[in-house]
Image (cartoon, rainbow, N blue to C red):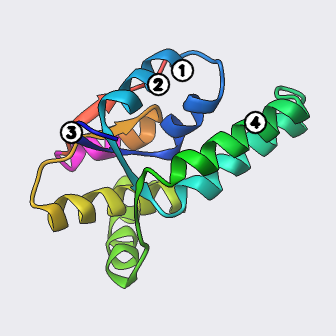
Amino acid sequence: MAGPVAYFDTSVLVKRYLDEEGSTHTRSLIRRHRVVSSVIAPLEAISALSRRQAAGLLSAAGFAASRARLLKDRDHWELVDIDERVIEHAVELIPSTRLRTLDALHLASAMYFQWRSGNRVPFVTSDALLRDAAKRLSLQIIWAGA
């Protein structure tokens, strides 16, 4: 996608495939930005969609369509690999942020991408705990929550 780069965590990316509060705003953000995320994001997103289907909140056809769109979209995203540096940074973040494992990996991936690119990259999230941790680390935030 053309436009400025932004790091999107899975809480936001899932909104692209559902009709829920924040979905319209999320779709607009995705259209306006080049999506960067962690290599774990597609897996996390499919898991979230699958849980919604299992809970009866998404039909089988809706799940299949969302999964297909996600896999197609993934080809246009830049996904940050989880290497030893990202894992080490996530390990360092957990005690001070109290984030769950995958959220710490997202935050570490975003910070690694920002360092590697040499540019300040907005962190797009709809997860309040992740937003607050990113703020404490002085990341620029784009809030896509409800």
Q: Nearer the viewer, mark 4 or mark 1?
A: 4
Q: Residue at x 62, y 53 (%)?
A: 44
* Quadrant of the frame with the N terminus: top left
- Measured as percent of width and height from the top left, residue 14 is found at 59, 37
Q: Residues within 10 Å of mark 4 (few under 14, many from 20)?
A: few
Marker count (numbered): 4
Q: Earlier in the sequence, mark 3 or mark 4?
A: 3
Q: CA distance from mark 1 to mark 3?
A: 20 Å
Question: Which residue is disc 3 drawn over?
Answer: 4
- Measured as percent of width and height from the top left, residue 61 is found at 87, 32
Asked whether residue 55 appears in the rendered view, the answer is no
21 to 118, vertically: above or below: above
Q: Which mark is residue 23?
A: 1
Query: Are the residues tagged 3 and 4 within 8 Å (C-beta)?
Result: no
Q: Earlier in the sequence, mark 1 or mark 3?
A: 3
Looking at numbered disc 3 in the image, what kind of residue is underneath it? Pro
Q: Residues within 10 Å of mark 3 (few under 14, many from 20)?
A: few
Q: CA distance from mark 2 to mark 3?
A: 15 Å
Q: Residue at x 79, y 44 (%)?
A: 50
In the rendered structure, which segment of residues is drawn in magenta?
Answer: 132-138
Q: Which SS class for mark 2?
A: helix
Q: Residues within 10 Å of mark 2 (few under 14, many from 20)?
A: some
Query: Are the residues tagged 1 and 2 within 8 Å (C-beta)?
Result: yes
Q: CA distance from mark 4 to mark 1?
A: 16 Å
Q: Nearer the viewer, residue 42 or 83?
A: 42
Q: CA distance from mark 1 to mark 2?
A: 6 Å
Magenta span contains residue 134: yes
Q: Which SS class for mark 3?
A: loop
Question: Which residue is disc 4 drawn over?
Answer: 65
